[in-house]
Amino acid sequence: MEIYLVAIVILAALAVSDLIVGVSNDAVNFLNSSIGSRVAPRYIIMIIASLGMMAGVLFSSGMMEVARKGIFHPKLFTMPELMVVFLAVMLTDVVLLDLYNTFGLPTSTTVSIVFELLGAAVAVSLIKIGKSGEGFSSLVNYINTGKALVIISGILLSVVVAFVCGTVIQFLSRLLFTFDFHKRLKRYGAVWGGLALSVITYFILIKGAGGAAFITPETLAWIRTNTGLILLGSFLVCALFLQFLMLVSKVNILKPIVLVGTFALAMAFAANDLVNFIGVPLAGLNAYKVAEAGANPLTTTMTALQGATPSDSMLLLAAGIIMAVTLWFSRKARTVTATEVNLGRQEEGMERFDSSALARTVVRMMASLAVGVKKIVPGVVLAKLDKRFNQDVYHLDGGADKSGERPSFDLVRASVNLMVAGALISLATSYKLPLSTTYVTFMVAMGTSFSDRAWGRDSAVYRVTGVLTVIGGWFLTAFMAFTVSAVFAYIIYYLQAPGVIGISVLAGLIILRNRRVHKKREKEAEDFEIFNLKKIKDGKYAVSTTFEHVGYFLREVAAVIDAAYEGMAGQNRQTLKGALKDSKKIRDWANIIVANIFKTLRLLHKEDPIHSREYSHTVSALQEIAECQRDAIRRAYDHVDNNHKPMLPVQLEELKQIKNLVTALLTETSNAMMKKELPDFDTIEKDKEELKRLMKTFDKNQVERIRNESSKTRLSILFYGFIRDTNLIVEQTLATLKIFQESFRLNNK
């Protein structure tokens, strides 16, 4: 039995790991609305969410039965067989959720644990069937096959229902309040807020506290029977309280609604999803105790697990503390939350996902549908709708905080997110329908952003790609959970202790690799953050900051040009591949800086219309530089990737001289702009003239090489292409430098 005691210790360690990775993924469910709307400082939001989770864990004891008997029938398994199942499940869950967290994709921890249990249980059951000589049809005796079908149907139902409801309710709410909602809140905000809080209160009763041991079946039945009475009473009390609050204070009543909703969802998460993280280890502990008490520990069937077993409150409290600490310190939780907030933000900007063929098809279909609807709906009605959805107020004000950053969406949408998600989850729970908390909260958030016209023509295809990616990840979760868990179960069953050790080492290596990948992705995200124009004071400040951004941009261009040459000279495909990735980053930087320039131009046009036109010329210069550096690295990569003949030594020597002059000029310009001081124009002018002279000389040399056929066609194309691209980069850099010089003169008058 000692070996199985070690297995219990391993399960306990995996439970802690699973709590960390699980909370990192599920935190988006209850943090999205409050963080996206910036309803309060982040520490206030985190405190409220932590309190909600601590309250929820005390109500979760009734949910622990799922891990023991929800997917398979324990009476047909022995303790060693269940240990195989539980170890396979926990190892799979930690690796799978950490993988999703690394790439910032929200998924359902419920789906993952259910299909992991299903996969491992099927694997062990098939082994038992093979040994006993039973037919494959006897698998249904071991497995609760209906559960898998319920979960799959729940995925489809959650996606459609939540998105439609979020879209419709947000449409009606925006019609009522518009984006200029402050004045209208005074008129009928108490009624609307009372409705929202009553729904959230009912959600707490049904979903948050429904699994509490101290709520008897009779009490729960009474709550469900008197739903209308509870909602009406909550509505009247909340509406009167909010009306009184508006009369005696200047508090925005949407803020307490969002904060209470955050508490409710955090409580429901802890109460219902805690089983996903510690349910399996607790089931393993129960199985060990049952076997230890039996006459034949290794052959006793686990019939005792069919009954109810109370959970240790101290263990639940410890789990709650781990979840709360994770919520505060997990960087991956922020990554997952940022994905959902980015997909739903009101303004356009740098998109998290690229476009896809399916997304483009969907957007075209919706655009065609919109054209058809406009032909049917009278123009007067469309004009009134456009007026109610006028976003000018949001874009002009938008509730910017002290740092100058505006929230991703306003409090109206945040409160609708929480109200609709709470209502749908409560309704599904009361009717025992298979809706997933993760799926509901995500799709409601997407539905409200779609209804709020956050998905404009310039962002829709990227947002749709993101939504389709997340939804596809949900189905992939089920497939991966089932498959990997089954494979792990086979390995552990036949290899026993060495199998557990081997899989544990593999899991540790995967998690370490994920950690490195996540750090790299965070670094890339921080690079993009450099280019955010925060707290724009005036046109001069915006111009100065933008030129500083251009300095960072030119510094990276110099690095890519250097990498392109080194890759060509050494025929190093990996160097060129890395540079190719950097070239895409540079083009993205150029797009962000150009967007910032447009913002700045709107300010400059009011302050200095004449010089604003000169400043606008930097747009074309940046775009040209971005395209040229891309062409240079793409041409070099294709040449090496296709295994073409390397460049001649004399060609490499000539290009090296050009490369050195170009990168020196870019670096000099970059340093000046980043330091916000004028460069040494004498040095730059000398470099410019020297570059012209070299290009003229090297052009003659290359023509001679073409005549004597020492340089074949592909080498000549590569040679001239590099010279052309670097020459254009220099020309546009010098043009930008002249504009910088003029702006420097104006700013220092």
Image (cartoon, rainbow, N blue to C red):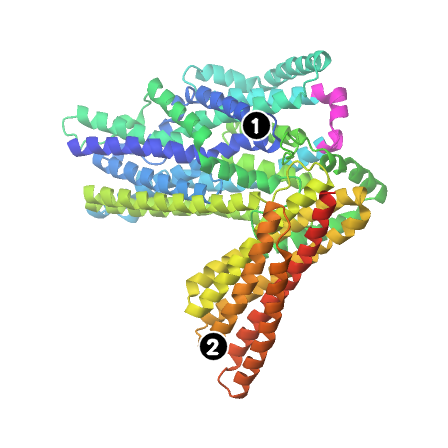
Between the residue at mark 2 and the residue at mark 1, the CA separation in whole angstroms equals: 71 Å
Q: Nearer the viewer, residue 210 or 552?
A: 552
The one of 35 and 105 positioned closer to us in this rendering: 35
Residue in the picture at 44% in, 17% down: 217
Considering the image in quadrants, where does the C terminus appear?
A: top right
Specify whether residue 283 is in view. Answer: yes
Task: Estimate the x, y position of residue 444 in percent, counting from the top left.
Answer: 59, 36
SS of the residue at dot 2? helix
Q: Nearer the viewer, residue 116 or 154?
A: 116
Which residue in the rendered view is the most extreme toward the right? 380
Question: Which residue is pictured at 75% across the width and 30% down the height?
Answer: 180
- Image disc number at residue 356: none
Q: Which residue is mark 2?
A: 650
The answer to whether 696 appears left or right of 747 in the picture is left
Residue 540 occupies quadrant? top right
**Residue 100 lies in the magenta-colored region:** no
Give yes or no for contact between labels 2 and 1 (Cβ–Cβ under 8 Å). no
Q: Position of residue 719 (x, y in %)?
A: 54, 74
- Residue type at tag 1: Gly
Q: Position of residue 634 (x, y in %)?
A: 53, 66
Q: Which residue is mark 1?
A: 422
Name the residue furthest bottom. Answer: 708
Q: Which residues are magenta?
A: 174-191
The tag earlier along the polypeptide, 2 or 1, is 1
* Residue positioned 50% across, 86% down in the render: 709
Give the farthest residue toward the front: 682
Q: Quadrant of the N terminus?
A: top left
Which amino acid, mark 2?
Val
Across and down, in percent, residue 188 comes to 74, 21
> Could you tell me which secondary element the residue under label 1 belongs to?
helix
Compared across the picture, whether 406 is left or right of 118 comes to right
